[in-house]
Image: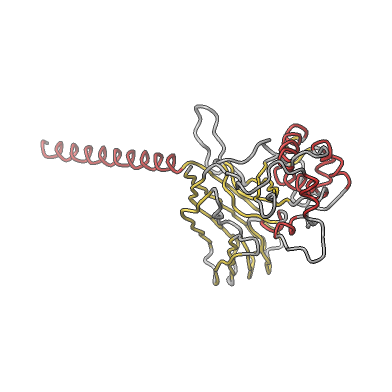
Amino acid sequence: MLLHVTHATRYDYAPPVETAQHLAHLKPMNTASQRLVSHALTISPTPAQHGESPDVYGNTRAFFALEATHEELVVTAESVVDTAPPVLSPAIARELPWEEVRERFRYVKDSSYDPASDFVFPSRYVPRHDDFAAYARPSFAPGRPAFDAAMDLTLRMYRDLEYDAGSTEISTPAIEALAQRKGVCQDFAHIMIACLRTLGLPARYVSGYLLTQPPPGRPRLVGADASHAWVSVYLPGADGPGDWADFDPTNGRQPGEDYVTLAIGRDYSDVSPMRGVLHGGARHTLAVSVTVRPLEELKEQAAAVAASQSQSQSQSQSQSQSQSQNKESS
C-alpha cells in the first residue's frame, strides 16, 4: 500500500518561550516491509538550527533550535510510505521453545554479543515484576514455541484489557495499567514487553501508525487518527541470528501492510514523537492530529477539488460573459 501520513503537533505557551531545543522522531523507517518514498518536516516559527541524525537503533532524529521568543510552535510531518505485508526471515527457528530462546540470552562469559540482548533488560517504562510473569505464564507453557506463546499472549491481552483513552497518562506505570486492566496502546505495549522481559525474552517497543477505516458511507475525518504502538519479539535462528516478529496486543493481531513503522526503542522514552528543553513557557496546551490514508484516496480528493474549482471558474466566466452581452444589448 502507498500510505500518506500527516502528523501535526501544536504547542501554545503562556508565558511565551524565549528559547527552545527540540528532538523529534517523526520520520518513518526503511525496513524489510516498508520503504520511505518521501518525507517533509515543516516547523513554525522557522528554527535557527535544524538537522537530523540516526540514533543507536537506526531511527532518524530531527533536532531543531528556536532562538526567538514565540507563543506557539507548530510541527507538521508529511510522509509517503510504501508498505508490504511483513514476512519473517526463513532463518528463524519458529518452533524453538521459548525456554531455549531465554537461555540464549543468559550471560555467559566470552560468548558472542547479540544486539537483541539490549532488549532483555528493564528500561524506564518497562520494569521487571513478578506480576508480569504471573500474567504471562498461562501463555508460556513448558516447551511451547516462542512465536506461538507470544501470539497467545497478544490475544489474551486483547481479550482481557480494555482500551480506555482516559484511564492512563504516559507517566502511568505499566504495573498499574496491568492491575486496572485498562489503558491505551502505549500501556498495552509496555505491559507485553514487561511480560516478555520478565521471562528473559528480548522485546522492543515500536511506534508508528495504523490505517483506520471510516464508518461505511462516511468520509475519512482529517486529524482523527492517532499514533500507535506495538511490540517486536526476537526469534533467533536455529544456530545463529534470527528476526523480529511484530505483535499488536491492542488489536489482537500481527501488523500488516496497513501499519507504518516510525521508530523502535526499549520503550516510549526512546521514541517519543516530540520532546524539548524550554526557557520560559511555564504552561502550555498541546494539540496533536494524525491522518493516515491511501495515497490514491488523497489524489482522488485533490482531483475532485480541482474539478470543482474549474467548474466554479467556468460558471463565473459564463456569468460575466452573459452580463457583458446584456449590457451591449441595452
Q: Which quadrant would the C terminus be assigned to in this image? A: top left
Q: Nearer the viewer, residue 21 or 82?
A: 82
Q: Say which residue appears at 59% left-offset and 65% top-offset.
A: 54
Residue found farthest to the right: 130
Residue found farthest to the front: 239
- Would you place residue 276 above or below residue 99 in this image? below
Residue 179 image offset from top left, x and y in percent: 85, 40
The way the protein has been coloured in the rendering is secondary structure
Residue found farthest to the left: 329
Residue 122 image offset from top left, x and y in percent: 80, 56
Q: Nearer the viewer, residue 166 or 77?
A: 77
Q: Say which residue appears at 68% left-offset and 69% top-offset.
A: 279
Q: Nearer the viewer, residue 126 or 284?
A: 126
Residue 182 image offset from top left, x and y in percent: 77, 38
Residue found farthest to the top: 217
Q: Say which residue appears at 19% left-offset and 38% top-offset.
A: 323
